[in-house]
């Protein structure tokens, strides 16, 4: 297969759909965007015109009937993921799936089964794995710069005013609708960080203790705050905080990774984005790393598209795949269950 002809299904998570389409318009080797579907009248048509797709659809099933489309990027609202993936896999097309994989373990399992049954590839869009600063952190840990990692803290503080379901919207829309988003601020970004912990520590979660609440945004029917302590099977202890109730967009992401012989500070929107402190040269004291322009963040969309295309063309197993999506979701859902039951919750969860 020389060129992978791509479609986008659902423009609900425009934060990911638009930059991916922009990079495809600029040019990704062996890839082209040919179609887009969104059930809202006019959305897909305008999007297709802006990014050079051949055709737009309000009914995604008509799009999936096309034999000349090889793969689909799914950026629809979360509770639609299982239905969409089953339809796409049934049409024999590969899938780049937005986070979270689903809103429930049952739907996550439906997705994993569909991919296996139809022998198609599914790559999860966990973009942190593709940001240069985060990749450098992974390299440093693998090099043993901080010894054995034993703890981590990751926090994102986002104002609700940033959460919009289309570029021109003035309300959160589906993000704050339990029927479409499933949950709220804790799940929204929390699944990025639970995947981050699994990736960095190369370990699964064992227990979760959490508090989830609606602290300041009383007019939405979902949570705006969550914090969880996750004990990994390796013994490492990780804390994740994910919110929609920040006063403004100040320093949304910050992370500390501590090992037996050093520490890493990561905050990709400040400079330096990455600081390393270790017990051996050249990291004695504090050494900073920084990236410029798109390399600070936006290039992650380009990198994940390139990886997805390469998985298809070279018949590689996608990582992170459906199982990774399921495990990251499971930790977050265990956090909600822990808050509800007011106790620690052991993994794995029963479906």
Image: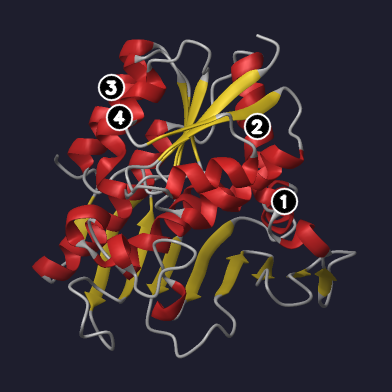
Distance from Cα at disc 3 to Cα at disc 2? 23 Å
Is 159 situated above or below 267? below
Mark 2 Cα within 10 Å, few/some/many (few <14, many 20+)? Answer: some
Label 1 packing within 10 angstroms: few (<14), some (14-19), many (20+)? some
Mark 2 residue element: helix
Colour scheme: secondary structure
Provide residue 234's location: percent of width, then percent of height.
44, 50
User: Disc 1 vs disc 2: Cβ atoms closer than 8 Å?
Assistant: no
User: How far from the left and from the top, in percent, is residue 35?
Assistant: 52, 30
Q: Which residue is mark 4?
A: 111
Residue 300, horizontal then vertical, whole percent: 66, 49
- Circles 4 and 3 in contact, beta carbons < 8 Å: yes
Q: CA distance from mark 4 to mark 3?
A: 5 Å
Look at mark 2 in the image and give the residue it sits on.
Answer: 307
Q: Which residue is mark 1?
A: 299
At 41% across and 24% down in the image, what residue appears? 63
Q: Looking at the image, is mark 3 or mark 2 earlier in the sequence?
A: 3
Report helix, strand or loop for mark 3.
helix
2 w.r.t. 173: above or below = above
Q: Residue furthest right?
A: 282
Instruction: Tell me how far mark 2 sits from mark 4, CA to CA.
Output: 20 Å
Q: Give the number of the mark in front: 3 or 1.
A: 1
Q: Which residue is mark 3?
A: 113
């Amino acid at each position: 297969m020389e060129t992978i002809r791509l479609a986008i299904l659902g423009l609900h998570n425009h934060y990911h759909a638009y930059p991916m389409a922009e990079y495809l318009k600029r040019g990704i080797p062996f890839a082209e965007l040919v179609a887009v579907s969104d059930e809202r009248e006019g959305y897909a048509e305008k999007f297709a015109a802006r990014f050079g797709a051949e055709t737009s659809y309000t009914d995604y099933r008509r799009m999936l009937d096309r034999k000349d489309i090889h793969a689909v990027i799914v950026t629809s609202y979360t509770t639609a993921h299982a239905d969409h993936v089953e339809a796409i896999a049934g049409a024999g097309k590969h899938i780049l799936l937005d986070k979270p994989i689903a809103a429930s373990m049952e739907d996550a399992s439906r997705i994993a089964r569909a991919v296996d049954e139809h022998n198609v590839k599914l790559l999860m869009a966990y973009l942190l794995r593709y940001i240069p600063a985060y990749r450098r952190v992974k390299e440093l840990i693998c090099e043993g710069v901080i010894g054995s990692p034993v703890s981590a803290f990751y926090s994102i503080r986002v104002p609700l005013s940033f959460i919009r379901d289309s570029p021109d919207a003035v309300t959160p829309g589906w993000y704050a609708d339990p029927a479409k988003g499933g949950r709220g601020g804790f799940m929204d970004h929390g699944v990025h960080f639970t995947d981050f912990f699994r990736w960095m520590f190369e370990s699964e979660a064992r227990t979760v203790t959490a508090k989830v609440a609606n602290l300041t945004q009383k007019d939405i029917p979902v949570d705006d705050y969550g914090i969880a302590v996750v004990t990994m099977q390796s013994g490492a202890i990780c804390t994740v905080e994910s919110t929609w109730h920040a006063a403004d967009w100040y320093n949304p992401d910050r992370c500390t990774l501590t090992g037996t012989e050093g520490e890493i500070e990561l905050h990709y929107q400040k400079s330096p984005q990455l600081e390393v402190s270790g017990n051996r040269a050249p990291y004695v004291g504090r050494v900073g790393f920084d990236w410029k322009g798109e390399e600070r963040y936006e290039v992650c969309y380009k990198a994940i598209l390139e990886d997805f295309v390469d998985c298809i063309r070279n018949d590689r197993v996608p990582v992170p795949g459906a199982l990774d999506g399921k495990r990251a979701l499971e930790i977050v859902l265990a956090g909600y269950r822990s808050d509800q039951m007011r106790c620690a919750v052991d993994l794995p969860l029963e479906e």
